[in-house]
Amino acid sequence: MKLADALLLSLSLALIIVGIHQTLTHGVQASYAIFMFAVALLFWFQYRKMQRPEEPPAPKKKTKSGKKR
Protein backbone atom coordinates (compact mmCIF):
# COMPACT_ATOMS: atom_id res chain seq x y z
CA MET A 1 0.00 0.00 0.00
CA LYS A 2 1.39 3.34 -1.00
CA LEU A 3 1.38 6.42 1.20
CA ALA A 4 -1.43 8.09 -0.77
CA ASP A 5 -3.60 4.99 -0.40
CA ALA A 6 -2.95 4.83 3.33
CA LEU A 7 -3.83 8.51 3.68
CA LEU A 8 -7.07 8.09 1.71
CA LEU A 9 -8.14 5.14 3.82
CA SER A 10 -7.21 6.84 7.09
CA LEU A 11 -8.94 10.08 6.16
CA SER A 12 -12.11 8.32 5.11
CA LEU A 13 -12.23 6.33 8.37
CA ALA A 14 -11.63 9.50 10.38
CA LEU A 15 -14.47 11.23 8.52
CA ILE A 16 -16.78 8.32 9.31
CA ILE A 17 -15.97 8.73 13.00
CA VAL A 18 -16.58 12.48 12.79
CA GLY A 19 -19.83 11.81 10.94
CA ILE A 20 -21.00 9.44 13.67
CA HIS A 21 -20.23 12.07 16.28
CA GLN A 22 -22.09 14.72 14.30
CA THR A 23 -25.06 12.37 13.89
CA LEU A 24 -25.28 11.78 17.63
CA THR A 25 -24.96 15.47 18.53
CA HIS A 26 -26.69 17.34 15.66
CA GLY A 27 -28.64 14.76 13.69
CA VAL A 28 -28.34 13.05 10.32
CA GLN A 29 -29.02 16.18 8.30
CA ALA A 30 -25.90 17.89 9.70
CA SER A 31 -23.64 14.89 9.05
CA TYR A 32 -24.87 13.84 5.61
CA ALA A 33 -22.18 15.78 3.71
CA ILE A 34 -19.43 14.32 5.90
CA PHE A 35 -20.62 10.76 5.22
CA MET A 36 -20.85 11.39 1.48
CA PHE A 37 -17.32 12.78 1.40
CA ALA A 38 -16.08 9.73 3.35
CA VAL A 39 -17.82 7.38 0.90
CA ALA A 40 -16.30 9.26 -2.05
CA LEU A 41 -12.83 8.82 -0.53
CA LEU A 42 -13.49 5.11 -0.03
CA PHE A 43 -14.52 4.78 -3.68
CA TRP A 44 -11.37 6.65 -4.74
CA PHE A 45 -9.26 4.31 -2.59
CA GLN A 46 -10.93 1.28 -4.19
CA TYR A 47 -10.40 2.74 -7.69
CA ARG A 48 -6.69 3.28 -7.00
CA LYS A 49 -6.43 -0.25 -5.59
CA MET A 50 -7.99 -1.74 -8.74
CA GLN A 51 -5.67 0.29 -11.02
CA ARG A 52 -2.52 -1.13 -9.40
CA PRO A 53 -0.89 -3.94 -11.40
CA GLU A 54 -1.08 -7.34 -9.76
CA GLU A 55 2.14 -8.65 -8.27
CA PRO A 56 2.88 -12.34 -8.78
CA PRO A 57 2.97 -14.33 -5.55
CA ALA A 58 6.42 -14.89 -4.09
CA PRO A 59 7.75 -18.45 -4.44
CA LYS A 60 7.68 -20.49 -1.25
CA LYS A 61 11.01 -21.44 0.28
CA LYS A 62 11.97 -25.08 0.57
CA THR A 63 13.59 -26.49 3.66
CA LYS A 64 16.46 -28.95 3.66
CA SER A 65 14.02 -31.87 3.85
CA GLY A 66 12.42 -30.69 0.59
CA LYS A 67 9.09 -29.73 2.14
CA LYS A 68 7.56 -26.33 1.53
CA ARG A 69 6.95 -24.00 4.41
Image (spheres, rainbow, N blue to C red):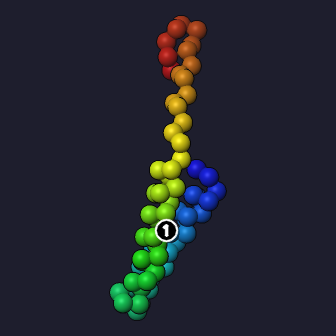
Q: Residue furthest left?
A: 28
- Residue situated in front as seen by the camera: 10 or 48: 48
- Residue situated in front as seen by the camera: 60 or 65: 60
Question: What's the residue at 47%, 57% (across, down)?
Answer: 47
| Badge 1: residue crowd in 10 Å (few <14, some 14–19, many ≥20) | many
Question: What's the residue at 55%, 15% (across, down)?
Answer: 62
Q: Residue furthest right?
A: 3
Residue 32's place in the image compared with 50, above or below, is: below
Residue 6's place in the image compared with 34, above or below, is: above
Left or right: residue 1 compared with residue 22: right
Question: What's the residue at 46%, 64% (across, down)?
Answer: 42
Residue 52: image location, x then y, percent: 53, 47
Residue 4: image location, x then y, percent: 62, 59
Q: Which residue is mark 1?
A: 41
Left or right: residue 50 compared with residue 61: left
Q: Amino acid at mark 1?
A: Leu
- Residue situated in front as seen by the camera: 15 or 69: 15
Residue 51: image location, x then y, percent: 51, 50
Secondary structure beneath label 1 = helix
- Residue situated in front as seen by the camera: 68 or 1: 1
Residue 28's place in the image compared with 69, above or below, is: below
Q: Residue furthest bottom?
A: 26
